[in-house]
Every structure is written in C-alpha cells, then in structure tokens.
Amino acid sequence: MAPGFWNRRGRRRASALGLLGVGVTIHYLGGSFAVGMLLWFVVAVGIGALVARPWGLLLTAVP
C-alpha cells in the first residue's frame, strides 16, 4: 500500500509540473496559458479514463 501511495503522490507532482510546462510552452508558442492548461486537462482526463478502467476492473476482480 505504501509504494502505491508514494507513486500516486509522485505522479500527481509530475502531472502538476507537466501541466505547468505544457501551459508555458503553448503560451510561448503564441497561444494562451489558459488554453494550454485546458488542452492538458482534456488529455489528462482521457488518459485517466483509459488507465482507471483496467484498474477498476482489476480491483473489482480481486476478492
């Protein structure tokens, strides 16, 4: 349980840094920082849905 907890924390921190990085990059490319954040959020939600589904099935299958 502890390794999973730390992985989740690390992933969350990395996601926040990635979000900031993508927003800043798009901002410098002539876009808006808010648009960059929104695009990253949409991508993150899509990936999250794909990742969460197998994990949910796996957790449901475990008695």
Image: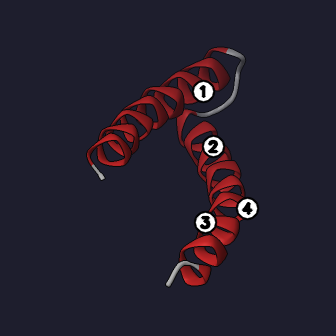
Which of the two discs, 1 and 4, labels the residue nearer the N terminus? 1
Residue where numbered disc 3 is placed: 55
- At 68% from the left and 71% from the top, the residue drawn is 53
Give left or right: position of 46 versus 10: right
In whole angstroms, how far apart are the C-alphas of marks 1 and 4? Answer: 21 Å
Q: Earlier in the sequence, mark 4 or mark 2?
A: 2
Displayed quadrant of residue 55: bottom right
Mark 3, residues whose alpha carbon is within 10 Å: few (<14), some, or many (≥20)?
few
Residue behind mark 4: 50
| 3 or 4: tag closer to the N-terminus | 4
Residue at numbered disc 1: 22
Secondary structure of residue under mark 1: helix
Tag 1 near tag 4, CB within 8 Å = no
Whether tag 1 and tag 2 are in contact, CB under 8 A, the answer is yes
Q: Mark 4 against mark 2, which lies toward the viewer?
A: 4
Residue 40 is labelled as: 2
